[in-house]
Each structure stands twice: as C-alpha cells, then as structure tokens.
Image (cartoon, helix red, strand yellow):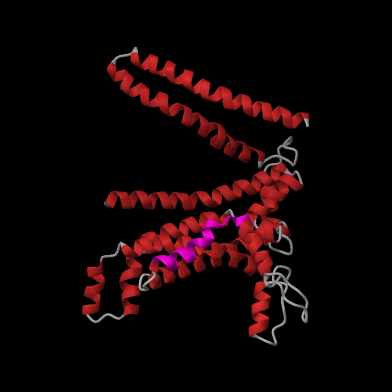
Amino acid sequence: MGVHTNYILLAIIALAVIPIFLWVYLLISEWIASHTNRRAASILRPWFWILPAISLLVVFLVYPVINTIILSFMDSRSENFVGLKNYIYIFTDPNMLIVLRNNLLWLVFFTAACLVLGLVIAVLSDRVRYESVAKAAIFLPMAISFVAAGVIWRFMYEYRPAGSTQIGTVNAILTTLLPNFEPRAWLFDRSTNNAALIVVGIWMWTGFAMVILSAGLKGISVDVLEAARIDGAGEVAIFFKIILPLMMPTITVVATTLIINVLKVFDIVYVMTNGNLGTEVIANRMYKEMFNYRNYGRASAIATLLLFAIIPVMIMNIKRFNAEEGNE
C-alpha cells in the first residue's frame, strides 16, 4: 500500500512541477532571445522551443532503446555480461524457433490476405450503389480494441463435444450446414489454432487496407480507364495492366504498415491462447520472459530483435515517401 501511495504522490508532484518548470524555462528562453541581436534570436528561439520535445524523446525513447540493447548482452538479473548468449538462445532454442515460425506465418498469411481482400473489396465497393455503407461495415472491426476482438472470437470458436449444443458460432454454423461435420476445438487443435488467430487479425485489419487502397483507387484518372475500355481492354486486363501498376505506391505503404503491426502482434494471442499450444509469437514471448520468468536479458534480446526487424521496413517506407514527395 505504501509503495503505491508513493507512486501516486510522485505522479501528482510531476503533474504539478513539470508545467511550472516548462513555463519558467520558456520565460527564461524568451528573455534570452529578446536580449540578443535579431540574427541570433532567429537561430536560438526555434531551438529553445524544440529542446523540451527533444529532451522528452531522449528520455522516453532514445535512452530506453539504448538501455534495452545493453541489457540484451547481460544475464537474467542484468548483473553479468554474457555476450551473444541471449541471441544464440533465440535462434537455437526449440521453443523460440516455434515462436519465430509463428511470426513468419503471421507475416506471410496476414499481410497477403489483408492486401488481397482489401484490394478486392476496394475495387468491388467502388462499383456498388451503397459504397459508403459497404465500406463502413468492412471497416467497423477497426473500431474494436484487439482485446475485445479476442474475447469476441473466443466465443465464436467455442467448442462443445459432438452431440452437444454448439454455443460457438463457427462450430454451430458448420454443423448446421454440414451434418457430418465434427465440431473442432479450433484454439486447442495445433493444426488449426494459428490459422484461427490469424483469421482474427485479418478480420480486424482488412478494413484498414480497404480504406487506404480505395483512396488510391479513386486517385486514378477515370479518363485513363475509359481510354483503355475504348481501345478494347477487358476489365481483367485493365485491373492487372493499369490499376495495379498505378496503385503500387499505395499498396507498398499498406504492406509496410501491415508488416510493422504484424511483427508486434500481441493482444490477440495473449487474450485467446496466451501463446499456449504452439501459438506463441515474439511479443508474447518477450512479455513472458520479462514478467513471468524475470529474465531481463532474454526479454531485452527479443525486444532488440523486434526493433531491428521493424527498422528496415520503416526506412523503406520513409524513403518511398520522400521519393514521392520529390516527384510532386
């Protein structure tokens, strides 16, 4: 109780002191800038204003990243240097290899399915009368938190033995449509549980892909498409030879966003299976190493691996964005 009280007092003090400190800092900064010549003031004033933001980035982003990388070379108690031992564990331990395999499955199937479904829905919804209603219905799962989605789909995958009333939506539908179908424990069967989890992710993120791709689709000139139709091109040829190439920049942005998010997937797995029965992913394993096993070295190594897996994707995204800005 005393520890929690101390934390609350520290939080209250911080909330009171930090605004006062920033106010005093800005007053002093403006006083210094106003007592220098105009040229020096024009150089100093922007730096005075941006310095608090830079300081916050260093304290809450740069320092934790550097500290995590350092801890990844330490033992479980962060006391002794162990070199690459934690990284060797990641790539040699049988359980960690399953974790990496699962993330690869998520990366391939989740990304591909979201892109394909998002693109197909974007193209089809562009041709229906109630386009906005159709898009809203597809995008709706994005408004649900990942935890809530996990709870919803746990009920949908619920299993009861054959002959019992199926309370899970998936088994209830399949046993009704297919009389000979045997109900399955989707989340407990190792042959289906990873696929069942990936389906939840696809259900949530397809709407995001659809909205962005739809915006890219509407950016294609109608005159170009009409000219192709006049020249005798069919709808399939127009899609693959005109629409798809013109939408590649948008598709790349959506793909990189999906990749970044799927590498960090945690909530769905944690809520639905907690990584049991061969469903563990990198973020889930990192959580367990940190908070369950108290092995800070391994947890930091996994976090570092995740960081360096995401960085190249982000760099590629930034380069493409800069290239597009340069072309405009």
Image quadrant containing the N terminus: top right
Please give the name of the residue rendered at 65% of the width and 44% of the height, measured from the top-left corner: 300
Q: Note whether 86 is above or below 206 in the view shown.
A: above
The quadrant where residue 194 appears: bottom right
Front-lying residue, 278 or 88: 278
Q: Could you say where residue 270 lies in the image, as x and y percent from the top left?
A: 68, 56
Residue 304: where, in percent of width, then height? 60, 46
Q: Residue 138 magenta-drawn? A: yes
Q: Examine the structure image and report whether residue 60 is included in the region drawn in magenta.
A: no
Q: Is residue 145 above or below residue 229?
A: above
How many labels, in total?
Answer: 0
Residue at 37% from the left image edge and 53% from the top image edge: 320
Residue 58 % position (x, y):
52, 32
Residue located at (39% from left, 18% from top): 30
* Magenta stretch: helix, strand or loop mostly: helix
Q: Is residue 48 left or right of residue 154?
A: left
Residue 148, position as x, y percentages in the image: 62, 57
The residue stretch that appears in magenta? 132-147
Residue at coordinates 66% horizontally, 49% vertically from top-left? Answer: 87
Taking depth in this image into account, of 183 and 229 the one nearest to the observer is 183
User: Is residue 97 at least partly visible in the picture?
Assistant: no
Q: In which quarter of the image is residue 246?
A: bottom left
Indicate the quadrant where residue 153 lies.
Answer: bottom right
15 sits to left or right of 191? left
Answer above or below: position of 248 versus 178.
Answer: above
Furthest residue in direction bottom, as rendered: 180
